[in-house]
Amino acid sequence: MTRNDIRALVYPLGIPLLGLGGMMMLCLIPSLHFYDGTALPMFVCGLFTLAVGLAILGAVGKPKGRVDRRVPFLLVALIWLVLSFFGTLPFLATGSVTKFSDALFESMSGITSTGATIFSDVEHLPPSILLWRSMSQWIGGFGIILMVLAFIPSLGINKYSLYTAEASGADNSGKGTITVSETIRRTLSIYIFLTLVFVLLLRLTGMHIWDAVNLVFTNISSGGFCIYNDSLASITHRQQGILALAMFFSGINFSLLFYVLTFRFGKIRHKLDQFGFYLVVIVVGIAGVMLALHYAMDYSWKDSFRCSAVQTLSVLTTTGSLVEDTSFWWTPILFFYVVLSLCGGMAGSTSGGLKVMRVLILFRNVRNILRNRLHPSAVNPVRLNGKPVSHPIINNVMVIFFVYLFTIILGVLLLMICGINATESFGACIACITGYGPGLGASGGLGCYEAFTVSAKWIASLLMLMGRLECLTVIILLIPRFWKQ
């Protein structure tokens, strides 16, 4: 790579580091308000992060002209890794965590909005750390790469390449109609708007502003970190419903929300198929779990509907918030939720997983293959919103699907080698790669990953990164040909 390519890799790190340092400084507010004794270490962490960010922007010049095509893939992975490592500073400096592997696990989980945690008792954490966990998920839910593109007018990098390399659920169906920067600005405006709306709604129910901000930050971002040991079980049913609604909106394509809120209904036609499928999955999931809770676990109809609605939305959008300790639920429900978390929300949302658009294309492709077996001469293209889906897109979906399966199989095997039993390995792998958070066994329900070995935590952290970048970006970096000139 040339010197210009190196500048293209290093210079963009300055902007997110400044944002991360600013977030650490904001954590001084609860520290000083609640007198938790972490003001000095949080200030030092924030100051150090800001200084590094400013040093990068001041010492490294902007790239000029075009850069190597490999740069976007390297830059995306590098930004997530660098911010995750800097995100460990508040945990280590305040003494909330003593082991670096634990701090990296928690930081990676926050930055990737996964929600897996090593803390068994979050209520005794300093308020500054609680806000730090919430804010890291809020910024990670939107997508740090997207924020870089929103605030840097020109990097010498193809913006669309960087946008799709992060693959945080970007819906490419609108490419060519508006610029990537405009899409990002619209997405950010909707994200902030929804955050403010749901904080206000929780305040109207009587919830303290501190609790409301933290809960909205982690649920609108499909993160799932909570400030209570019992997740959402101790808040009122009305507040649970509001957060369930926040999860629902977090799983919808933000461009679709923008067009609806601005009354531009003619622009939403190319997203109606996946939105309809998203609604169908929600309705079927809620109905199925509700029946299971009522008949298999003797829940009342009212409680079964409430629990199934909140928990199904949490699982489908890979949020990870819990309406109660689900580890005691009927085993078929838990298995269904594992499969549901693989689906995820709509493309262009904050949720993880495969995304419902890809699942819909997979189903329709299988249906057409079966039809062609019966009628070999018939032409049955896979259609989305009434238009044929091109073969490259279908092939791309198939590749992502099989890469997900391969990564899950390999991840389960590696976790088992690290001494984790088969059930927990399977649950943890799915939870980390989809971004859902809670796994199975000791790490499921209201449990945590504290008992995982050091090597298992490193593997789980890598799985979170791969899931956030939808595997392909990380795997591409491991191919020897990628590093050849």
Image (cartoon, rainbow, N blue to C red):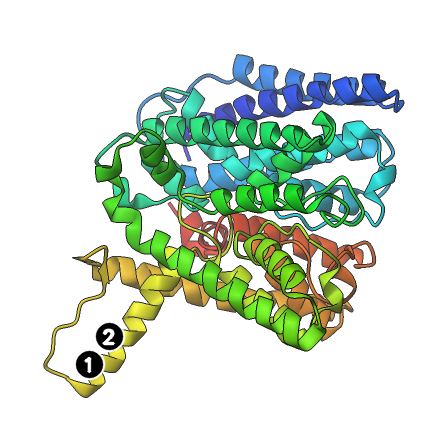
Residue 170 is situated, as x and y percent measured from the top left of the image, at 39, 43
Q: Amino acid at mark 1?
A: Asn
Residue 420 is situated, as x and y percent measured from the top left of the image, at 76, 68
Q: Amino acid at mark 2?
A: Asn
Residue lying farthest to the top in this orientation: 58
Specify the label residue 372 is tagged with.
1
Q: Nearer the viewer, residue 399 or 317?
A: 317
Residue 292 is situated, as x and y percent measured from the top left of the image, at 61, 73
Give the residue drawn at x 42%, y 25%.
Answer: 150
Q: Nearer the viewer, residue 208 or 4?
A: 208
Q: Nearer the viewer, residue 329 or 149?
A: 329
Specify the label residue 368 is tagged with.
2
Left or right: residue 327 versus residue 65 is right
* Screen quadrant of the C terminus: top left
Residue 63 is situated, as x and y percent measured from the top left of the image, at 40, 22
What secondary structure is found at the residue carrying circle 1? helix
- Picture quarter containing residue 208? top right
* Screen quadrant of the N terminus: top left
Give the residue drawn at x 58%, y 48%.
Answer: 465
